[in-house]
Image: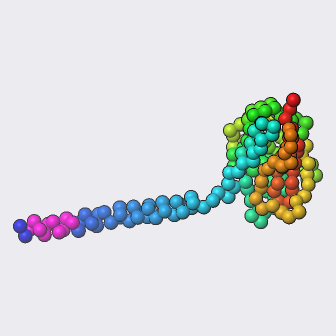
């Protein structure tokens, strides 16, 4: 009996020694998971955002991701001139309309589209593209529905987080704005007859 107890004690010590590295790895893994979960709780750098408006019974919605300045030079820097920009961050910016629209002079049939912009030092264009569901940096010019001029004006103070919004909605018309850093880009949107 005594021998059995001695071997039992030795066996338990051996099991404890053998499992110590496994337990250490499990603890490290749990700590890593907790650290990862803590990181996951931080808000995204460019959170999802939405602009929507009802115009004479028609629904117009734009889904985008809103980047922040974070001390960076935006236009002519992070967003270079003369290069198509995704007009936000992350996945492509999506326009959904339940009615036919005229954005500036461009006829946009009811449906879903991607919005891009072509930045310039003095002039900007809004690009309405028929390809949808892609990452924002995937741009196929062959899928363009068309391009329209954006009115460029300066903000009174820099806007930290990019926003897309509608305002001055009246009757069958609204104004679409893309506002970030020192610029306010706008274009009229009307229901097409």
Does the magenta segment cover residue 9? yes
Quadrant housing the C terminus:
top right
Whether residue 83 is visible here, answered yes or no, is no
Q: Nearer the viewer, residue 39 or 189?
A: 189
Q: Nearer the viewer, residue 17 or 167?
A: 167
Range of the magenta residues? Answer: 3-12
Spot occupied by residue 78 in the image (x, y as percentages of width and height): 79, 56
The residue most toward the left is 1
Looking at the magenta stretch, what is its main secondary structure?
Answer: helix
Q: How is the image coloured?
A: rainbow
Q: Is residue 28 left or right of residue 8?
A: right
Q: Which residue is drawn at 88% across and 45% down?
A: 187
Q: How many labels does the image show?
A: 0
Quadrant housing the N terminus:
bottom left
Spot occupied by residue 107 in the image (x, y as percentages of width and height): 86, 32
Q: Is residue 154 left or right of residue 130?
A: right
Q: In the rendered image, which quarter is residue 174 located in?
A: top right
Spot occupied by residue 81 in the image (x, y as percentages of width and height): 86, 51
Q: Which residue is drawn at 86% across and 38% down?
A: 172
Q: Which of 43 and 7 is in front in this view?
A: 43
Q: In this view, does 13 lie to the left or right of 126?
A: left
Q: In this view, does 19 lie to the left or right of 100?
A: left
Q: Which residue is drawn at 81% across and 48% down?
A: 166
Does the magenta segment cover residue 93? no
Q: Nearer the viewer, residue 150 or 85?
A: 150
Q: Is residue 53 above or below residue 23?
A: above
Q: Residue at x 29, y 63 (%)?
A: 18
Q: In this view, does 53 lie above or below 21?
A: above
Q: In the rendered image, which quarter is residue 188 located in?
A: top right
Whether residue 162 is visible here, answered yes or no, is yes
């Amino acid at each position: 009996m005594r021998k059995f107890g001695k071997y039992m004690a030795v066996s338990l010590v051996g099991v404890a020694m053998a499992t110590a590295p496994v337990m250490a790895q499990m603890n490290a893994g749990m700590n890593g998971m907790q650290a990862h979960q803590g990181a996951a709780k931080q808000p995204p750098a460019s959170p999802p955002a939405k602009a929507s408006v009802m115009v004479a019974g028609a629904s117009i919605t734009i889904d985008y991701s809103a980047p922040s300045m974070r001390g960076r030079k935006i236009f002519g820097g992070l967003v270079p001139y003369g290069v198509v920009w995704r007009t936000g961050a992350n996945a492509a910016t999506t326009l959904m309309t339940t009615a036919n629209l005229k954005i500036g002079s461009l006829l946009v049939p009811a449906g879903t589209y991607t919005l891009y912009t072509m930045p310039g030092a003095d002039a900007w264009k809004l690009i309405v593209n028929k390809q949808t569901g892609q990452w924002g940096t995937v741009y196929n010019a062959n899928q363009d529905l068309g391009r329209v001029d954006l009115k460029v004006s300066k903000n009174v103070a820099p806007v930290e987080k990019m926003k897309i919004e509608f305002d001055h909605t009246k009757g069958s018309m609204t104004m679409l704005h893309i506002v970030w850093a020192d610029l306010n880009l706008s274009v009229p949107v009307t229901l097409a007859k």
